[in-house]
Structure formats: structure tokens, C-alpha cells
Image (spheres, grey):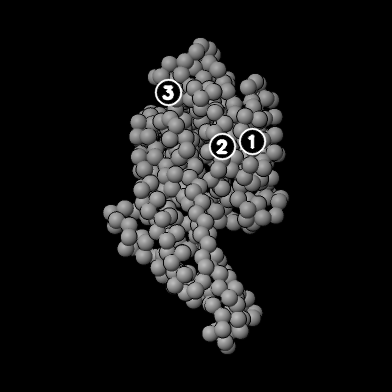
Amino acid sequence: MQPILADKAFPELVQWADELAALRRDIHAHPELGFETPRTVDLIVKTLKGWGLEHVDPDEVKGGVVVVINGAAPGATVALRADIDALPMPDNSANPWKSQTEMRCHACGHDGHAAWLLGALRYLHEKRASFKGRVVGIFQPAEEIGRGALRVVQSGVFEHWGIQEIYGAHDEPTVAKGQYGLCAGPAQASTDFFYITVKGRGVHAARPHLGVDPITTAGVLIGALQTIVSRKVNPIETAVLSISSVNGGNFHTPNVIPETVTLSGTVRTFNEDVRNQIEAEMARMVERVAEAENCTGEFRYDRLVPSLFNTPEAVEHIRSFITHQFGAEHTEEMPISMGGEDFAEYTFKVPGCIIRAGIRDDSHKAALHHPTFDFNDEVIPATATVLAGTVLERLAALS
């Protein structure tokens, strides 16, 4: 394997490339979900302690690891974060390191995120005599279910260690390897899920007048819900309301009208007032449409993560390092995305940002969350360089 930007990345990280790739592939072969990540945590802890790091804590955050590296003298504290959880889906890749667990897959690259944070922390540990201040590394669980970052925040890690800034990276298969996508300000939308149950009265399909049909009611409701974004939200605002599942009846019994129909979906927006408006409008419509059709409606709205705001100053700090280390041609502007990212919880606490690390080449074209997706190991040393180098520059500026 030939790492990308090998002539410009930190030499130590290039030297460790194969070792970091092997760790990444180990994590890929043994994916774990949500907060239940004991094997991944154990591998991270053993690896870091084997490299001589002393403060490696798997207990401060359930399913995660908090690492602390103290420099040669007191100073500022800057954090780095990587998510480590996988997705409940098949791994249809043909790699020797493909998932060994059915219906679990690292199809979002969190295995690679863990590997580049491992590399960055190893490098910072070896350079600890050369900087003032403290580095906190956060290996975070449960990003895919939108709960992990909030759990980290609630644990008090930021207050305990006095974290002043935080940085992270996410792999991006739409961006060429060796390129880094940056987006200052609003970057990714809030993420909410909703669940609706429409209850009627089941009956023989030839006698619909003797029952109460939840399917037709659900059809009316689906149309009504789509008017929230198109007719009730200010058109200047950006919002998505997608109904992603509709379930009712039995495909093989077409002569039975069912008792219930369930619907679920997601809401995305950048504006908290719009988020509140959509939830309120949905609750009202579910109740009143169901009532108008003699049904009952149940509505649950789960707020997962807020919209991600990348602190503009933090984006410029990381852009400055990439430009100096690799050249300005290795940065590009990323458009805002309606996809969610719970890194947003961190930038509510302190300045920070998350960048997109390109991984695309002829062998890595699959989209995130696709069953054939695999991470590109060639980018690990360069991205670990970006994270470690940015931290060193920020510690020098803040301390």
C-alpha cells in the first residue's frame, strides 16, 4: 500500500501506515453497534497502552474511550474525536477483512476514523515533550443512532479536562483521495425521526362500510404531511420531511382491510424554529386527519441531533494547516448537507469543526451506507497528520 501524500505527511505516520491499516481492517472485520462496542474498545485500549500511552480510560463514557496526553508544561486543551460504531446492515464487499458478523457492517468508515485517531494520538504522544498543554482523544460510540456525542457531553468530559476546541474528520467517497472538504458555518442538518400509527377497524375488503379503513386515512395523511414543507414552512428555509416506510395489511391477503397502518420517516432542517414548527404541524395533522376519518392517530417524534455548525475560525485553522503542509490545492469547499452528524453536540459546547477526508479512487467509489462500501487505507497517514498537526498549532496559539 502506498499512502497518499506520503512525501508531505508526517514521516512517522507514513512509517506506521501498514500497522494502522491492519488495525482498521481488524475493526472492520468485527463491527459493533451503538454503545455495545466492547471488542473495539478493548482493541483501542490495548493498542494505545502498548504504545506507551498511560491515561486511556474506557469507563468515562460507556462504549467509548477517552485518552489524555499531557505536554511538557501546562497550557490549553484541544480535543480530537473519532466515532467507532458500525451499521446494522450486510457487508457485501469481497475483501478478506469483510465483516465476520451477519448484519453488521462498517459502511460509513468509522473503522478508518478510529485508525487515523489512533495514529494521531500515537504521534502526539511521541512529541509530548515538544508542546505545552493537553490533548484529549475521544473515541465515541453510537454516532449512527445519534446518541453518542450527547452521552460524551453529559459525562462531563469537556468540563473535567477543560476542553477549549475540538476537531474531527469524516471520510467522503464523493471527494478524491488526498483532498479535504471544508464547510464553515451551517454544515449538516438536524436529524429527527418520527413514527405514526393510524388505527381503524379491520374488516373484509368487500365490506369496507362495516369497518374503518386506516389505509385510506394514511393516504390522506401522507399527502397532508407533504404540505408542511411546501406550504407552511417559509420557502427561504431549507427543510426535508420524508416518509420512508408505510406498513399495513398483508400482501398475500388482499381481501382484508387491516386494523392499523404504521408510517415512519425523518425530518431535516437547519433552523430550530422550523424544526419546532414541523413537529407541531405534524402532531396536529396526525390527530385531526385521523379524527376526520374516524380513526385514531398516534405520533412519536424523536429528536436525534441538532444541526452541525462548524465554527468558521476553526475551519480556517485546519485549512491553514492543510495549505501549509500539503498545498492549497488539497482543500475544496463542501456544500451543506441534509445528512446528520452528532459532532454538532460538541460545537454547541466549544469552537470546533469536522472536515471531510476524500477517499475516492477507482477502487473506492461506493457511497456511504452502501453494503459494498469499504474505507481507503491510503488516506490514514495524511489525515492523521492533519489532525495531529492542527492540534499542535492550536496548542501553540492558545497556550
Q: Is residue 353 above or below residue 374?
A: above
Residue situated in front as seen by the camera: 276 or 132:
276
Q: Residue at x 33, y 57 (%)?
A: 233
- Tell me, yes or no, whether the two marked residues, 2 and 1, touch with CB atoms within 8 Å: yes
Residue situated in front as seen by the camera: 11 or 194:
194
Q: Earlier in the sequence, mark 2 or mark 1?
A: 1
Please, what is the three-letter code of the amino acid marked with disc 3? Arg
Q: For numbered disc 2, what is the local secondary structure?
A: helix
* Other-residue count near label 3 (Cα within 10 Å), few / some / many at <14 / 14–19 / ≥20: some
Q: For numbered disc 1, what is the local secondary structure?
A: loop
Name the spot of residue 245 as percent of width and height, x first: 53, 65
Q: Nearer the viewer, mark 3 or mark 2?
A: 2
Q: Is residue 291 above or below residue 337?
A: below
Q: Which residue is mark 3?
A: 394
Q: Earlier in the sequence, mark 3 or mark 2?
A: 2
Mark 2 to mark 1: distance in Å? 8 Å
Residue 68 location, quadrant:
top right
Q: Is residue 236 left or right of 354 when viewed as pictured?
A: left
Q: Which mark is residue 262?
A: none
Q: Which residue is mark 2?
A: 151
Q: Residue at x 47, y 38 (%)?
A: 345
